[in-house]
Structure formats: structure tokens, C-alpha cells
Image: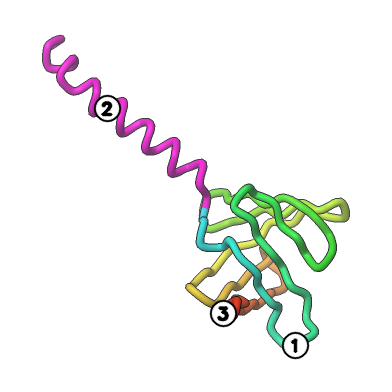
Amino acid sequence: MRLEFLRRAPLLAAFAVLLFVMAGCGNSSIVGKWRMAGTENQTVWEFSGNGSVLVGEVRGRYKFGDQDRIKIETPFATTVYVVELSSDQLVLQELGGSKLEFTRITEAKR
């Protein structure tokens, strides 16, 4: 029995490390610039890979939780949203509240 555990220990350790890495990454597909739906002059939200977010000119932090949720903290408010994310569409739905819809801004290639 002990020999069996010793054989599996490296595999179990590798699996545990992988789980921690995946949990710490959050949802990297949100990284980038997103424009709120509507006219061209709508606010741009920019999500960085380090957990920071820029909402217009207001800096904040974001963190993914369970059940497709994201918490966004700025100096003015902390809000939890349910996230729907595809390659170029982002929807943030407040719990029991309003819905914000975004389109990814793609940088023109030179």
C-alpha cells in the first residue's frame, strides 16, 4: 500500500500544482479593451492580465470567483457581476440588476 502511494505521489503533486495554477489564472480571455454597446463614444473598459482594470479613467482591480462571477473594485464602488464571455462579446450582469454589454476592441494590424 505504501509503495503504491509512493508511485503516485509525483503524479498527485503535479496535479495539485496544475490546479493551483489554473485557479490563479482566472479567465485570461477577458484581457484586452472592451467598448460598452451603443455609440462610439461609450466608455472603454481595459482588463489587464495582472488583475487591474481601467474603466474610462478610473483604475480598479478585478477578480474571478465561482459560478461565472467577477468582482470589480474601484475607489467608488465594489460590484459583483455574472460574466458571459465569448471571443468578441462580453456581458456583465449585476446580480438581480442591470446588464452591461461590450464588444472587444481589436487593434488594427500594421
Where residue 97 sits, quadrant-wise, is bottom right
Query: Contact, CB < 8 Å: mark 2 with mark 1?
Result: no
> Do residues under tags 2 and 3 come within 8 Å of each other at their CB atoms?
no
Would you name the residue on which mark 2 appears?
12
Residue 44, image x and y in percent? 74, 73
Q: Closest to the observer: 40 or 3?
A: 40
Q: CA distance from mark 1 to mark 3?
A: 22 Å
Nearer the observer: mark 1 or 3; the answer is: 3
Instruction: Look at the numbered disc 1 and give the secondary structure of its residue.
Output: loop
Q: Amino acid at mark 1?
A: Glu
Is residue 61 depicted above or below 34 in this figure? above
For the point 75% across and 60% down, the residue is 54
Q: Is residue 70 magenta?
A: no
Q: Give the image location of residue 16, x and y in percent.
A: 36, 31
Disc 3 element: loop
Span highlighted in magenta in the image: 1-26
Dot 2 or dot 3, earlier in sequence? 2
Q: Residues within 10 Å of mark 1 (few under 14, many from 20)?
A: few
Instruction: Give the crowd class for mark 2: few <14, some 14-19, many >=20 residues within 10 Å.
Output: few
Q: Position of residue 85 (x, y in %)?
A: 52, 69
C-alpha distance separating marks 2 and 1: 51 Å
Q: Nearer the viewer, mark 2 or mark 3?
A: 3
Q: Earlier in the sequence, mark 2 or mark 1?
A: 2
Above/below status of 17 relative to 49: above
Q: Residues within 10 Å of mark 3 (few under 14, many from 20)?
A: few
Q: Which residue is mark 1?
A: 40
Residue, far bottom: 39
Q: For this view, does 39 lie left or right of residue 75?
A: left
Marks 2, 1: nearer the viewer: 1
The chief SS type of the magenta part is: helix
Disc ID at residue 110: 3
Where residue 95 appears, x then y in whole percent?
A: 67, 63
